[in-house]
Image (spheres, rainbow, N blue to C red):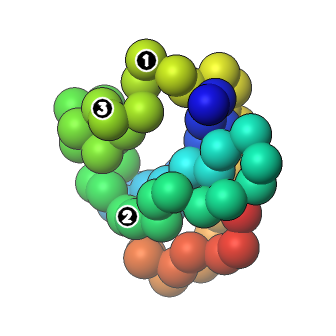
Amino acid sequence: MEFFCGLDVAMDETAVCVVDDRGAVHLQATALTDPDALLAVLKPFLRRLRRSATRPVRCRPGCIRNC
């Protein structure tokens, strides 16, 4: 199984969504906009993470849209 990650990056927090190759959502979370914090959230998926996409957003911290 492969995973794909979407990141909505804001100043303080980043919304994180991980889906598998069939489109099932495995993670919806927020983390501090900090490399170490994002790495900690994504750690369980890193070995099988195939692609990621980032998008800067201008919304209130913690908002998560559908992946």
Q: Which amino acid does label 2 sit on?
A: Thr
The spot of residue 23 in percent (x, y) is 76, 54
Residue 44 quadrant: top left
Spatial CA span between label 3 and label 1: 8 Å
Toward the viewer: 25 or 15? 25
Q: Mark 3 points at which residue?
A: 43
The single residue placed furthest to the right in the displayed view is 22
Q: Which of marks 3 and 1 is in front?
A: 1
Q: Nearer the viewer, mark 2 or mark 1?
A: 1
The numbered mark, 3 or 2, whose residue comes first in the sequence reads 2
Spatial CA span between label 3 and label 2: 14 Å
The spot of residue 54 in percent (x, y) is 66, 41
Return the mark for residue 30.
Answer: 2
Q: Name the residue under label 1.
A: 47
Q: Which amino acid does label 1 sit on?
A: Arg
Residue 10, relative to residue 21: is it above or below?
Answer: below
Q: Nearer the viewer, mark 3 or mark 2?
A: 3
Instruction: Kindly indicate whether the residue at mark 1 contacts the one at mark 3 (C-beta within 8 angstroms).
Output: no
Spatial CA span between label 2 and label 1: 21 Å
Toward the viewer: 59 or 17? 17
